[in-house]
Image (cartoon, rainbow, N blue to C red):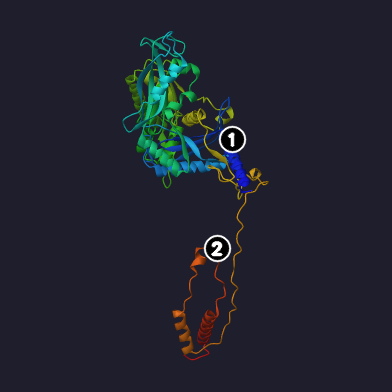
Amino acid sequence: MGALQEYRCKIQQTSDMHRVEMENKDYVIGIDIGSSSVVMSVGVKPQDGEMELKGVEVVPVSEGTVKDGMVRNFMELGDAIHKAKTALEEYVGRRLNSAYVGISGKDTYCVRYEDHVFVKDKDGCCVTAEDVRALHERIDKVTTGSNDEIVARLPLRYRIDDRQYVKNPVGTFGQKLSATYLLVLISKQQIESIKRAMHKADMTLSGLCITPTTLPNVVLDEVEKEEGVAIVDLGADLTDIVVVREGRMCYFVSLPIGSSSIDNDLREFVCAPKDKVEVLKKRCLSVIAEEVSEELTAPVQMAGRAKKQILQRNIAEIIGERLKDIASVIAKALKDAKFSSKVPCGIVLTGASAYLSDIDRLLARELGMEVRLANHIYGIDEASKEMISEFSSAANIGILLYGAQRTACLTTETPLVGVKSPTQSKHEGEVKESELDLTNPPKTPIAEPKFVAPKEEVVVKPIEKVEEREKIEEDEETDSKPIDLKAKESTDIEPQSEPQNEPKKKGRIFGWLKNINSTVNTILNGNEEI
């Protein structure tokens, strides 16, 4: 019977693990780490259609926790992630155990690397999929000697015999196959900080991606991807630029300037706190100052102070001038990368500050190219689009789509209270009542009966003389009982609470105290002289 019971337990454990895998296969969790907030979302991995968004949670982070895209305090970041995780678990009804994380910043960058292999078909010199696979394997072995780690290896273009560039080399003829790859790198210190933050939030890291590299599948259509376009993600501390041509991402950079510089300019001008400045930005009629009337004002109300009226034109001038500075930085980055003339479809603008009125017109005028807002999100169904803001959620949706192309995240269904599985799997400690195997319950050791000593009868003796009471106290100071070490070491018998009634010796003490209380009451009532 022992072997049979062990066999049944193994079958039950395998069933539990399979059930956990079935529950986990469709869910993807994405975390976008920004300088001002952490955005976590949960989606269902699509089988052949668009992703269904289950929930989104935005948690602000304290200033300095993430600066210029770099994690400065992983403890506070972990607390923010845990807060978002807890809120989403209550909303979605599942435990979130792992997630894909996206980040960008000064510690992320890209480089180009070229390598080659010789075609194995020596007679016909025809390039096959095996040759392309061999080239990819060589690139996978490339490492950096610095403190950075390669997180993505993206093929840009292939070349045959150092002459002809092709998009798909399979089926072409030549003796040498070479390719140019875009290597995406991030510092190892950042990876370690993110892992520590996830551990603080009681989660594991399913994968790490650079946020700008996930944007093309979210905000671009197929024509823009093929012809050439630049994505500009305007964040709080950073402005990310991604260039896509011929269906591939070929360049990205993170610039250390963002919408927080606009907030600082407004705070200095208005002398108002951060939340009031954000309200002023949303009430800005246009960022093109000459199109705003000089008579229109925006009220600012602060606690304990009189309401102030700020001219809308002054607000537009402050925001517009800072946007011009950002536009000049974008233009210089595209020029230095030699992509100024290689983006015929212009710029697609996204990010938390893309909602500013007429920002697309201002940037188009400053950059000298077409600019459109990313007002359409690809990859999610129509019902999910009602849950998000198009501009601020593009990065987080990109992380979800990145995870959907890979392994699903670990999630488990919230269990019924007090119901546990006979055999607990690695990732799941509790299951639903309907999933318990009641036909083959596991054998549990029968607890041995616990022996409880009978309570002694308490006898209260009459009041003794003072000499007798002093003798009793002296006996109590010297009296001791042997300690049963064997009983203390036993794990089967739990320690019993002391009986409420004590032995006779303590009863005599109780009688003595009762006599003292009676004497004191008599004195206080005035029935006896002092």
Between 193 and 408, which is closer to the camera in this rendering?
A: 408
Between 174 and 217, which is closer to the camera in this rendering?
A: 174
Question: Which residue is the extreme one toward the bottom?
Answer: 529
* In the depicted structure, whether residue 319 falls above or below residue 57: above
Disc 1, SS: helix
- Residue that badge 2 annotates: 494
Q: Is residue 397 visible?
A: yes
Mark 2 and mark 1: Cα distance apart in space? 41 Å
Relative placement, left or right, of 281 versus 378 is: left
Q: Is residue 287 visible?
A: no
Asked if disc 2 and disc 1 are in contact, CB closer than 8 Å, the reply is no
Q: Label 2: how many residues lie within 10 Å, few (<14), some (14-19) or many (20+)? A: few
Amino acid type shown at disc 2: Glu
Question: Which image quadrant for residue 131?
Answer: top left
* In the depicted structure, whether residue 244 falls above or below residue 58: above
Q: Label 1: how many residues lie within 10 Å, few (<14), some (14-19) or many (20+)? A: few
Give coordinates of residue 29: x percent, y percent: 51, 35
Which numbered dot is residue 46? none
Identify the residue at image location x=53%, y=26%. Answer: 379
Disc 2, SS: loop
Give coordinates of residue 113: x percent, y percent: 35, 21
Which numbered dot is residue 22? 1
Amino acid type shown at disc 1: Met
Identify the residue at image location x=59%, y=41%. Answer: 16
Q: Which of the two labelled residues, at mark 2 and mark 1, occupies the earlier sequence position?
A: 1
Give coordinates of residue 36: x percent, y percent: 42, 37
Between 129 and 227, which is closer to the camera in this rendering?
A: 129
Q: Indicate which label's residue lies in the foreground, 2 or 1.
A: 2
